[in-house]
Image (tube, grey):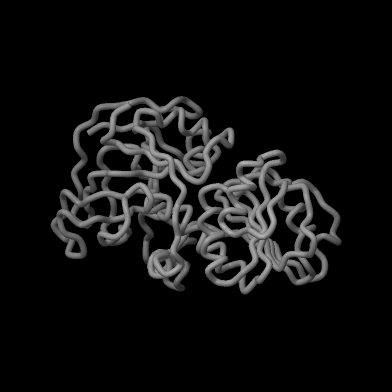
Amino acid sequence: MQAMALTSPGSLLRLQERDDPLPRADEIRVKVSACGVCRTDLHVVDAELPGIKYPIIPGHEIVGRVDLVGGNVTSHRIGDRVGIPWLGYTCGVCRFCREGMENLCDRPLFTGYTRDGGFATHAVADARYAFPLGEQGDDVSIAPLLCAGLIGWRSLVMAGNAERLGIYGFGAAGHIVAQVARWQGRSVYAFTRPGDDAAQDFARGLGAIWAGASDELPEAPLDAAIIYAPSGPLVPAALRAVRKGGRVVCAGIHMSDIPGFPYHLLWGERQLVSVANLTRQDGLDFFRIAPQAGIRTQTTAFPLVEANEVLEKLRTGQILGAAVLQPWIST
């Protein structure tokens, strides 16, 4: 197989030829047709997450067809289309797993971070952590749903019943969540990098009733805000924008340091919470409502070998919506 592998902290990905991986008894092997590029992949490449063992193949928004199954697998058959998300394994025995919080498992594995991911022609996954996708929709459009959609959904649920919802960082997750929120009847307020007129126009086109820079305030306080951009200074900005009793949800796996801010921004029973990973139930819930909500992902597809260039485009805000790698297309 071919893979774009990270061989050392902060280095460029390298195209490697490897033997095709073989699944263990409880695993499946998938021929990857599309893999979304997520901001978390940047955190892996930039060594901003702990405990990375090199080499590692990034990528955790994987869509493909099962082409080999382990001896104990009964849930998937060869030819099935599946999606492989960020959460790749949980122990099932720690306190969090036993209490229905597998997203907080003490001994998890994560696709594209602590086990090889989908920036490759093939990927191996624990069969229990691969979602059946059926045959509706094309692979490229579905790929961003495997993380941007799932984490977006979990963060939206955590935002509660907010009618006036702010979204800070209108990228892959933001543009999916905005569509779900509008379908639910919420009013969406989009906050982007200052001067990013394209992203603001994009947000308005998806139904946002207001779009502006992240250092601006809307005309009335928000009920809740979700932060997708990995920028710590957005936390006090979002707290400033929400009403008393409002909630700010930090949805990224990594964020720069949060600067000090006056207590009155938090006072008034405002809440500041974080989202950590996802559960399999999140996936089942989200993929059930996604067709009802009529989600249409904005994607741009690239060949696998252009992974480094795509990551740089993502880093510098040049991707509108979501980027997706396709291993089997050429430049």
Q: Where is residue 42 in the image (x, y as percent from the top left)?
A: 51, 37
The residue nearer to you, when weighing 96 against 153, is 153
Residue 176 left/right relative to 123: right
Q: Residue at the location (34% across, 33% down)?
A: 304
Q: Residue at the location (84% across, 59% down)?
A: 263
Residue 49 left/right relative to 305: right
Q: Residue at the location (58% across, 55% down)?
A: 251
Q: Where is residue 72 in the image (x, y as percent from the top left)?
A: 16, 61
Q: In this view, does 218 lie above or below 35?
A: below
Q: Where is residue 243 in the image (x, y as percent from the top left)?
A: 78, 67
Q: Total label count?
A: 0
Residue 9 left/right relative to 58: right
Q: Is residue 100 above or below residue 188?
A: below
Residue 109 visible: yes
Residue 105 visible: no
Quadrant into which the C terminus falls: top left
Q: Where is residue 69 in the image (x, y as percent from the top left)?
A: 16, 53
The quadrant in which residue 20 appears is top left
Q: Residue at the location (51% across, 49% down)?
A: 172
Q: Is residue 280 above or below residue 296?
A: below
Q: Is residue 77 above or below residue 312?
A: below
The quadrant in which residue 328 appears is top left
Quadrant into which the N terminus falls: top left
